[in-house]
Image: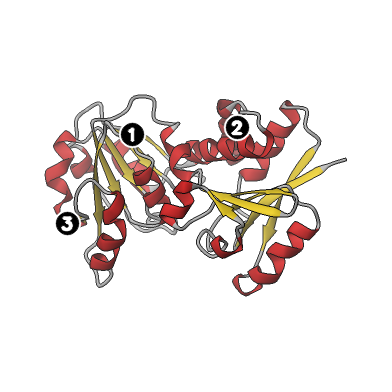
Amino acid sequence: MTDYYGLIGYPVEHSKSPVMQNQAFRLARIDANYQLFPIAPQNLATALPQLVAKGIKGLNVTMPFKQAVVPYMDELSDLSKRLGVVNTITISDGRLFGDTTDGQGFWTTIKQVPKQTIIIGTGGAAQAIIASAPKTTQVHVFNRMNEKFVAKADALAHFMQEPLHDLATITQYLPTADLIVNATSVGMNGEPSLLSPQQFSLTPRQAKVVDIIYKTDDTPFVAAAKQANRAATDGLAMLAGQGALSFAAWTGIFPDQQRMLAAISKERRN
């Protein structure tokens, strides 16, 4: 009997998750199918219980539902409680367990723990990355100064090592940064990179650059870093990392993360 899993969000048609999850099920010889479930925001309250009633075993959650699904959970992981977000739901006997694998999924892709990390952004993914950071890295978080800055700084204070920084002051932190992360959606719709090639050139030559979004071609952030001859990658590796952790939560089997990444990388090229 086939088990069913999937992704809820709106929109979800662009997602690469079915490619990597269905490959992982095949390799593990599990009779299961992973599907996309586009749910309009106003329909979440009826659509989620309907999926559970139909016997779905597990779900990934993407925008705009990572916070919205929390009240529907019967139990939450400690990290989801801290952050108030869920991106992975495991369903057993009709009970929903919510967890977030975004942060851990990101850090599984970083081979050498940096001493100094810069993270740009304060949204759900950024918070998960910050909260899951290795204890040995010093994390500096930046956000554009706007009317929400103080509220965001207060919301992040309980799991940050230092106060939130104004993005306008980032240049002074670049010369010692080992890892620079764009954890915003800036660049997804053609916006210019938050950092220029000139700014990236201020970083140490061995610095690594990651943009958590991904497109068919290099994102503006990745392109700017490469212009400065810095090693830069987009969000596909993080997608595979968090997806592997979700798969393990559902099945008890940790899949081959590199093969998951290869599958979605191939899909992007086609």
Relative to 24, is 183 on the left or the right? Answer: left
Of residues 269 and 110, the one nearer the viewer is 110
Mark 3 or 1 closer to N-term? 1
The amino acid type found where label 2 is placed reads Met
Mark 1 or 2 closer to N-term? 1
Q: Which residue is mark 3?
A: 168
Relative to 42, is 211 on the left or the right? Answer: left
Residue 134 circle label: 1
Percent of width and height locating residue 59: 65, 50
The amino acid type found where label 1 is placed reads Pro
- Residue found at x 38% / y 57%: 123
Report helix, strand or loop for mark 2: helix
Q: Which residue is mark 2?
A: 260
Q: Residues within 10 Å of mark 1 (few under 14, many from 20)?
A: some
- Residue found at x 45% / y 47%: 79
- Residue found at x 23% / y 30%: 115
Outermost residue on the bottom side: it is 42
Report helix, strand or loop for mark 1: loop
Residue 219 circle label: none
Of residues 189 and 148, the one nearer the viewer is 148
Q: CA distance from mark 3 to mark 1?
A: 26 Å
